Image (cartoon, coloured by chain):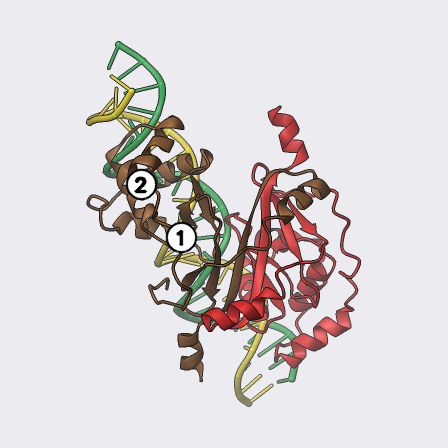
Chain colours: A red, B brown, C green, D yellow
Amino acid sequence: MAGNKQHGGASCQKCGQETPAELLAACRAAGLRRTQLLESVLEVLRTHTEPIKIGDLAQAKGIRGTCDPATLYRLLQRLEAKGLVRRIGLHERAAHFALHRAHHHDYVVCRECGDVATLNMDCPVEKLETEVGRRTGFREIYHELQFYGVCPQCAAKSA
Amino acid sequence: MAGNKQHGGASCQKCGQETPAELLAACRAAGLRRTQLLESVLEVLRTHTEPIKIGDLAQAKGIRGTCDPATLYRLLQRLEAKGLVRRIGLHERAAHFALHRAHHHDYVVCRECGDVATLNMDCPVEKLETEVGRRTGFREIYHELQFYGVCPQCAAKSA
DNA sequence: TTAGATGCAAACGATTTGCGCGGAA
DNA sequence: TTCCGCGCAAATCGTTTGCATCTAA
């Protein structure tokens, strides 16, 4: 399952720099109420480099007791609708979520163990978004880029 | 829902050019048995430009009666394991599948109606795969690139 | 003949909805 | 006080597995 193994990519320097107050302010501005759950979810997301799924979020340190998945789901839905959080598909059954940061991230996923590493490199796709919009007529375009492969650990096991 | 609306992108000229015989031969070479279901699934995938989900596949013209989802799932699993088919995540609950063609495709997805269009443009990411492999130690890397936005139809409705 | 495929049914797990209560504004 | 957000329970739905039967090789 999605573990915490490191895969070489240095973690992003810019991540985790947003202050809790800033995030909260953005949520308030979006019309969300200041809830204990909201605060702790924001804090978990803020300090997480990798996208996290609801199941893991529910058990994360800082979330009181075992949080109801349905509630979490609705909160994340709200956050996503407001553009504060991004839902990310990683070929796992459960959707992953991450703060929508100013700087964009791409991911590498191991197709054996499902482990996810965040890539910290210049993304060549960003400039394509306008091009795609022009071609297709789509608006408000963003993108998602994942690399899939076999991580060193799994490659070693197979050998 | 996933509709069949057109979104401007010209459909790929190269797609659908594989002959059924070639595909079947590839499957045989991979050790799969020549089944009626296999043949019809290949044919549906071959003539489909967009990735298709199991539910739709089960009802596609050419598939006899209502095919058992479990059977379809296992078949697609086998095909994916052999590298003949790619599973594609498009932020829908159901996974999508497409033939693994020699030429790579990227997709544009409407986040309102879920409609999917296949992009027919040079993908700038392919050359990055080796770079990512070098950085992370991952092997056998491929990538998946999706653009998300609001399609013209949905944009019109909102306005 | 024999291993691989299929169909049916049931188990699973993530997501989603209904509803009444409690807390933020 | 009012309305939004929460927790609990139940409904959905896609995916997965077990098992007996069938069939391509």
Q: Residue at x 47, y 67 (%)?
A: B111
| Res A12 → quadrant | bottom right
Image location (x, y in percent) of residue B96: 42, 51
Q: Amino acid at mark 2?
A: Thr
Q: Is residue A65 visible?
A: no
Q: Nearer the viewer, residue A28 or B63?
A: B63
Q: Is residue B44 left or right of residue B135?
A: left
| Res B1 → quadrant | bottom left
At mark 2, the secondary structure is: loop
Q: Is residue B56 left or right of residue A103?
A: left
Image location (x, y in percent) of residue B88: 47, 50
Image location (x, y in percent) of residue B18: 35, 43
State which quarter of the image contains the C terminus of chain B: bottom left
Cα separation, mark 1 vs mark 2, equals: 18 Å
Residue B51: image tag: 1
Q: Is residue A62 left or right of residue B18?
A: right
Q: Write down the chain letter for disc 1.
A: B
Decide: is D16 above or below B6: above
Q: Residues within 10 Å of mark 1 (few under 14, many from 20)?
A: many
Residue B19: image tag: 2
Image location (x, y in percent) of residue A98: 64, 60
Q: Amino acid at mark 1?
A: Pro
Q: Write down the chain letter for disc 2.
A: B
